[in-house]
Structures are given as structure tokens and as C-alpha cells.
Image (cartoon, coloured by chain):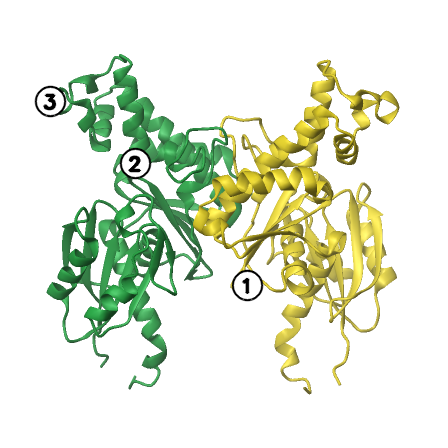
Chain colours: A yellow, B green
């Protein structure tokens, strides 16, 4: 009989900090969600203290931004500047007698989907996280590639809009939620006709991507065109990554996949016109399965993976 | 004392078919070059017959286009349509009692540079082949990734010019030799002032990238601007691939690297402004070292790699 092991997995990416106690069979035993607007390290320590059990073998973190895996430091987090330069291995290592591993948040999500989600059947896939920004993770030959995989920061319009990352025309600046909301607000400010003028008690600056999708379903022209334009750009990015990675699958995760029938279907249509036909034919494009849990589950999986060598000495 | 082994390596990409007898220490013993305008398979067989020795352990081919490695078939070769659908494993397997391995030509060049060229010191690098078109190969964790790596077919101008591959705004359509020549010819046809009007006995349709570079060195404005514009686009592509692969190095190979001080330096300047600074800081951008031999040497290396398992039974 094999003994269950547990790891803490945390996803430190978007507006919320998500932390879970994950069992070695990939089930989430318990999870908490805290705002990431305060002191992220303090919130994280407090959440881990709540979840910690005696059988916990390690802590895995998925962090937004460019991560130095060895040092456990976030080198640059454009979407969560408060964690820039923070050494999580130091901070958590002092508090808990456990090994701490870090990776990029989208890489962790890819690992989660590979282990227990939409990626289990594929030896290779490219995962896009579609939310406020766009991130990515790439699985090749059955394993997560330890590359930056900043798929939101490939330039799809060389002379296009400036991205906060410093590049111009990034995929993220055209196909992510922030870009969509920006485009709608700009259009409404410019006097465009749209039902969205009346959204949010008349305060268009509170519009969310969910609102845009809702209005699109009601037939609003501006809302539909915004989603479709963003979807076409996503398709450009997907096609480029198909041409680079020739993956078996492209897995799409994140809140924006909720607008699948407009946004993602437009992306698939566009990608089908752009990718090498020989490569597109053999690729499956499908939704992630673990939802918001992917990053936590993947981060916990890093712990179990690292722990493997010592298992060989344990009774089978 | 270890016994020398030999493999045939062939590069079937550009206007010429290059075939070499390569020793297991990576030296090229003998090589031949034939035009690829005729019957490619017949020319290849004839070249191999010339080079073949009793110690030859296998044949490796680097083929332009999307390659099915297992079946040894070129699925699609936009730049060399005559090899579309050809099964090289069948064709050569019938003629020679040797194992035949195939890969994409740029992948083979990357493998060559990893084995015996500019890539020997790096665990990870992205190689671009810069010629008529643009190809690529990616080494990660010390090994060539078996991905399509069609780096010339990432879209850098989503609404840009149509590429023969079917996509719009491909890197290749802006930064490769064919694009440069096309831009110059169009400008001259439109009456642009340039010394290049007098090139090639007045026949501007015979202009080559070498001509453009020569005129650029002489200070011709159109020639310089053409090289720099192409270089800037190359920089866009390099930055995107740095953001995706976070490599230790970017290695540039192919004829266009002859214009290093204008074309490539502009590319490096552009990439430095666009890539994540944290990633750009740690990347080296450098020229390939094997020149036109890279593909042949890399293709031969595939043979030696595949042969490895049987070596373990040989005397050390």
C-alpha cells in the first residue's frame, strides 16, 4: 500500500493568491484564495500555515513573471510588480522546514494540465493562459520545457502598440482581457454606438471582459467585434506557436476561454488559415480542464517530481 | 584505440545539394555540391555513391520543409517543391544497405553547430538560418528539440504581406534575402534614386543580396535602408524567440550573416529594445562557425547519435 503524500501548491499570478494542499494523486484537499494586493509573502505564509499538515513534503510556487528557478527569485513580474526581486525560497525556507520550488505561473499551469488535466494524453502541447495578460507553458516529449515561454510577448504587430514589457505589438496587447477592455472603453469614449454605454451603472471604466461577452451574446456589435478582433490576434499567436513547436495539442486556459464560442472559435479559424497545413491538421485545440486550480496543482506537482529520487529507496 | 566511423551527411535545402563524408570526430573528409534544380533523388544517390566508403555507418539528410522524421518524408517544402512528398528513406534504403535518417535542414544545421561549431559551449540556443528564406533549430538542455522550429514563419506583421506558406506577415517575408531583393526591385521600378540602378549591366532583376550589401558599403541609401529594415524585422523575431525560449545564445547562420555589420547589428539593436531585459542580458548573439557545412555535419551527427546504443557493446 502506498502512503499518500501532500504538497502545498500556490499560484501567485493574477489578482488573487491561490494556495492549495494537494495530494500525490492530484486531488485538491483544501484551498484558499487571498487578494494579492497586500503583502504577498505575508499572505502566502499565513495561507500555508492554515493548510500545512505533518505529511506535507514541500512547497511549490507558480509565480507571474520571469523566474530564476535555481535562486527562487522573480526577476521581473510586469503584471504583479510587488513580487519583483522577491526571493521566495529564502522567505519561505526560513519559516517552513520544507523544500521550496518555484516556476513561472503559466508553466505551473501547463504542468498541472499535463499531470491531471487536458494534457494527460499528449506528449507535447502548448498551453496559453488567457486572462488579464497572456502567459504560456510548453510540454515536449512528455515533460515541461524549462523555458520562459512568455507567449504573450511575441510581437504580432512589429510597429504596433507599446506593451508594458517594453516590446511593441505583443500578442498580449491585442488578445488579452486588458486589451479588449481598453479597446471598448476607447470606442465608447469616442462616441461609438453600443449597448455597453449603459453598463455598470453608466461607469464604462468598470467594464469587465465578462460584460463584453455578455453584451456580445445579446448581439452588441462593438462587443462582438472586440472579441473577434482579439480572437483573430490570438489565432495569429497560436499559428506562430504551431509553426515553431509542431505540438500535438494547443490547450487554452484562463478566464477568457469562457467566451469560447466567439473569441476562441475566431482564433481557431484564424490559426487554421495561417499555420502550416501539415502541422495544423494534426493539432488538437482544446480547453484546459483544471480551471483556476491548474497552477496550484502544477506547482504541487513540481514538489512530487523533485521528490522522486528519494522514492526509489522507499518500499514499493 | 577507437576506430573511426564515417557517415554521409547531406543538406538538401537551398539551390544546391550538399553532400559530405563526415568522420565521427566531426571532420569533413570529402564533400560535393550539385545543383538541386534537377532530379534531387538521382543527384543525391549519385553523390553518395561517389563518397561512400566501407566504413560508412549510415546516411543523414537535412531537408528543407516540414519533415516527418519517422517516415522519412518531406510533407511540404515551400522553397524546394520538387521534394514535396518524397520518401527519402525508401529511395535511399533501396539503393544503400545503410540506415537513413532525416530531419529538417535548419534543425540539422543547429545540430551541426551544437556538435562542432558555435554551439558547443551552450546547453541551449536558438539558431536562425538566414538565406533566401529563414529557418530555425532549437537546442535545449544540450539536445536538439525535435520540433518543426519554422522560425521564419512566425507572423511579425499580422496584417502584413502574404507569405508563400499561406500565412500573412511572416518573419521570412520581411527579413530574408528574397524579401530584401523584392523591396529593392520594387523601389527601383518605382523610380527610386539609387546606385543599384546601374547594377548587373542594368538588369535590376538579377540583383542579389550580395549586391545590395556591396552598394550599402558604398553608402547607397536605398541599399542601407533595405538591409536595416530587414535587420529590424529580424530583431523582432529574435526578441520573440528570446522571450519564448530564454536561450543562452542565439546563433545566426546563412549567407545573410555576411552583412553582419549592417543587417545583423541592426537586428541585435532592435532585439535589445524588445526582448525582456532580464532575458536579453544573459543571451549571447553570435555567428555560426561551420558555414555551409553545418547542415551536412549535423545530418551526419544524427547517424552517429542513433548509432550510440550499439556502441555500448563495442570494445571501449
Q: What is the x, y in percent for residue A30?
A: 85, 62
Question: Would you name the residue on which mark 2 appears?
Answer: B260
**Residue B175 located left or right of residue A47:** left
Q: Is residue A113 above or below residue A53?
A: above
Q: Which residue is mark 3?
A: B201
The relative height of residue A45 versus residue A53 in the rendered view (above or below) is: above
Whether residue A95 can be seen here:
yes
Q: Secondary structure at mark 2?
A: helix
Q: Are marks 1 and 3 on the same chain?
A: no
Nearest to the observer: residue A27 or residue A87: A27
Against A20, residue B53 (above or below) is below
On the question of residue B279 being in view, the answer is no
Classed neighbour count for the residue bearing mark 2: other residues with Cα under 10 Å, few (<14), some (14–19), many (≥20): some
- Counting the numbered discs, the total is 3
State if disc 2 and disc 1 touch (CB < 8 Å). no
- Say whether residue A5 is left or right of residue A246: right
Q: Which residue is mark 1?
A: A123
Amino acid at each position: 500500500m502506498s502512503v499518500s503524500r501532500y504538497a502545498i501548491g500556490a499560484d501567485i499570478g493574477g489578482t488573487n493568491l491561490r494556495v492549495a494542499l494537494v495530494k500525490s494523486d492530484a486531488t485538491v484537499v483544501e484551498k484558499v484564495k487571498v487578494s494579492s494586493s497586500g503583502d504577498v509573502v505575508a499572505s502566502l505564509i499565513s495561507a500555508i500555515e492554515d493548510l500545512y499538515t505533518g505529511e506535507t513534503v514541500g512547497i511549490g510556487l507558480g509565480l507571474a513573471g520571469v523566474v530564476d528557478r535555481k535562486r527562487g527569485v522573480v526577476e521581473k513580474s510586469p503584471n504583479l510588480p510587488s513580487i519583483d526581486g522577491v526571493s521566495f525560497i529564502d522567505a519561505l525556507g526560513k519559516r517552513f522546514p520544507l523544500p521550496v520550488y518555484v516556476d513561472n505561473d503559466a508553466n505551473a499551469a501547463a504542468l498541472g494540465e499535463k499531470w491531471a488535466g487536458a494534457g494527460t494524453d499528449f506528449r507535447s502541447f502548448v498551453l496559453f493562459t488567457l486572462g488579464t495578460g497572456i502567459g504560456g507553458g510548453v510540454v515536449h516529449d512528455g515533460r515541461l520545457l524549462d523555458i520562459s515561454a512568455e507567449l504573450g510577448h511575441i510581437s504580432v504587430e512589429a510597429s504596433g502598440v507599446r506593451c508594458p514589457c517594453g516590446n511593441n505589438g505583443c500578442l498580449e496587447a491585442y488578445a488579452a482581457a486588458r486589451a479588449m477592455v481598453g479597446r471598448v472603453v476607447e470606442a465608447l469614449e469616442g462616441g461609438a454606438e453600443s449597448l455597453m454605454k449603459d453598463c455598470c451603472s453608466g461607469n464604462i471604466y468598470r467594464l469587465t471582459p465578462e460584460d463584453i461577452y455578455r453584451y456580445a451574446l445579446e448581439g452588441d456589435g462593438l462587443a462582438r467585434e472586440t472579441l473577434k478582433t482579439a480572437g483573430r490576434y490570438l489565432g495569429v499567436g497560436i499559428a506562430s506557436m504551431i509553426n515553431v513547436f509542431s505540438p500535438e495539442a494547443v490547450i487554452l486556459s484562463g478566464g477568457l476561454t469562457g467566451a469560447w464560442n466567439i473569441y476562441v472559435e475566431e482564433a481557431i479559424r484564424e490559426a487554421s488559415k495561417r499555420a502550416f497545413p501539415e502541422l495544423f491538421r494534426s493539432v488538437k485545440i482544446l480547453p484546459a480542464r483544471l480551471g483556476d486550480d491548474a497552477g496550484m496543482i502544477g506547482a504541487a506537482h513540481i514538489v512530487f517530481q523533485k521528490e522522486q529520487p528519494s522514492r526509489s529507496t522507499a518500499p514499493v
